[in-house]
Image (tube, rainbow, N blue to C red):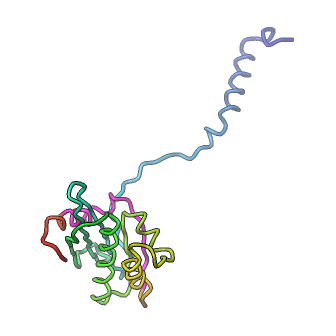
Amino acid sequence: LGLSSLPIPVIILLAAADWQHANTDLAHKPIRSLATLSWQYPAAGVTKINTDGCRNGETGRIAAAGVLRSSFGRWVKGFAANIGYGQVLDAELWGIYYGLKSAWDMGCSDVVLESDSAVAMHLLNKAVDALHPLATLLWGCQDYIKKCWGCSIYYVYCECNTVADRLANLGSCLDLGL
């Protein structure tokens, strides 16, 4: 017997079952949701450091900046630096270095550093070859991370790092230096 010899309601039910079987994976996909990206408060007693760097594509000038905030979100300290000329990774790493140095010099005992540079975060988490062009700067950052304090570093989306981004853009307008 062929499909044409079956009653129409049975054919419809078979087609529906076939469609459901073919789309079973689609039915089990996780539900997508939208998330708001914004700066998040650190845990109690933790100082959060957000850093950023920028480069003017026309001039090649670079700047770095950062902000230190308490677990209540209050501004503790900020900085902006016109570094001169270089690549954006240079600026990102200088921002991280100055942020860690500022927190250490202030006596912070527990810090979370956030940067929107995935490359910088990757480099800070691995051994750096002495021939790397930024080895000295990377070692300086890593030395601060390894000091006797609670220090965690995280990559964040740029939407979570807007204050540091704005400060870095300001830094490019300043005189050379910190």
Residue appearing at x 67%, y 31% in the figure: 20
Percent position of residue 19, x then y:
67, 27
151 left or right, relative to 25 = left
Residue appearing at x 38%, y 59% in the figure: 157
Looking at the rendering, the stretch of residues picked out in magenta corresponds to: 150-169
The quarter of the picture where residue 24 lies is top right
Percent position of residue 148, x then y:
43, 91
Query: From this viewpoint, which residue is outermost toward the top?
Result: 5
Residue appearing at x 45%, y 75% in the figure: 131
101 left or right, relative to 84 = right
Quarter holding the C terminus is bottom left
9 left or right, relative to 112 = right
Task: Decide: is 116 above or below 141.
Answer: above
Q: How many badges with numbers are in the image?
A: 0
Q: Nearer the viewer, residue 83 or 8?
A: 83
Quarter holding the N terminus is top right
Q: Nearer the viewer, residue 4 or 144?
A: 144
Residue 166 belongs to the span the image colors magenta: yes
Residue 149 belongs to the span the image colors magenta: no
Percent position of residue 164, x then y:
26, 66
The quarter of the picture where residue 155 lies is bottom left
Percent position of residue 28, x then y:
62, 43
The quarter of the picture where residue 25 lies is top right
